[in-house]
Amino acid sequence: MGTDRFRLDGRVAVVTGASRGIGRAIAVGMAGAGAAVVAASRDVVACEATVGEIVVAGGQGLAVACDVADRTTHQPLVDAALERFGRLDVLVNNAGVLRPHVTTRVSVDELDQLLAVNLKGPLFLTVAALDALADGGHGSVINIGALGATQPMEGIGAYCATKAAMANWSTTMAREWAERGVRVNVLVPGSVATDMILPTDPARREAFVAEMAAQNAFGRLGEPDDLVGAALFLASDASSYMTGRSLYVDGGLLR
């Protein structure tokens, strides 16, 4: 298989949660592989910084404000991609929230937010994008999952449950949309050093990093850039015979 199969020249990708962390790394990485990238999140100023990095490197990008929990922002995001670039080939559903709590402390409002962002958001945004993804003939949906979907973890049960539901539904989407040429896969990171999981207190952060690093084969936390290669694989023709599956990039955490 030639390396050209991993290229995304002429294709357009929408990446949610592209203002920082994994989303930003994937957005920049896809632009580097030739895609025009629409960087979306609630923080459009930070997305503009992501696009600035893409443009400086010679790529094409567009920053769009989108709150995935708000369905009224979904179609405008898709329309912005089509208006600017004329097509849509890749959708990376990366935006997510964690809200760590033991089960007895989970509030109704917190659970509603987790469901809105981690499950309903990716689901309904993908439905809004489906026709455009199918029209281009290379439609690929990448839902960012979590190890907790298959290995539930105490203290983040609600988050794990929403990610498990999204992984399950991703397989259903893949089966329903295969005849339209749209593939749906899940990219599952291990412990990645992002603001979402790292404690803000320096002492707690140091202890957390040491504990999590000791649990995987490489003895370190992942970095957002560690996910880029797998995202390019799932977005490109290199994975054209793969759908309804989960790809783990976890540093050997699952042993």
Image (cartoon, rainbow, N blue to C red):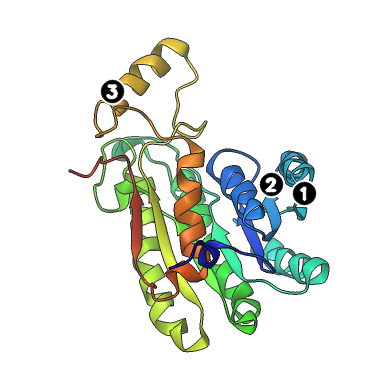
On-image quarter of the N terminus: bottom left
Q: Secondary structure at mark 3?
A: helix
- Can I make out residue 30 in this image? yes
Residue 42 got which mark?
Answer: 2
> Would you call the spot at circle 3 few (<14 residues within 10 Å), some (14-19), or many (20 or more)?
some
Vertically, is 18 above or below 194?
below
Please identify the quarter of the rendering in which residue 127 is found: bottom right
Task: Read off the residue under disc 1.
Answer: 58
Outermost residue, right side: 84
Image coords of residue 151 (percent x, y): 24, 47
> Would you call the spot at circle 1 few (<14 residues within 10 Å), some (14-19), or many (20 or more)?
few
- Can I make out residue 123 in this image? no
Task: Read off the residue under disc 3.
Answer: 211
Q: Is residue 162 left or right of residue 85?
A: left
Mark closer to the chain start, 3 or 1: 1
Mark closer to the chain start, 2 or 1: 2
Image coords of residue 239 (percent x, y): 43, 69
Kind of residue at badge 1? Gly
Q: Secondary structure at mark 2?
A: loop
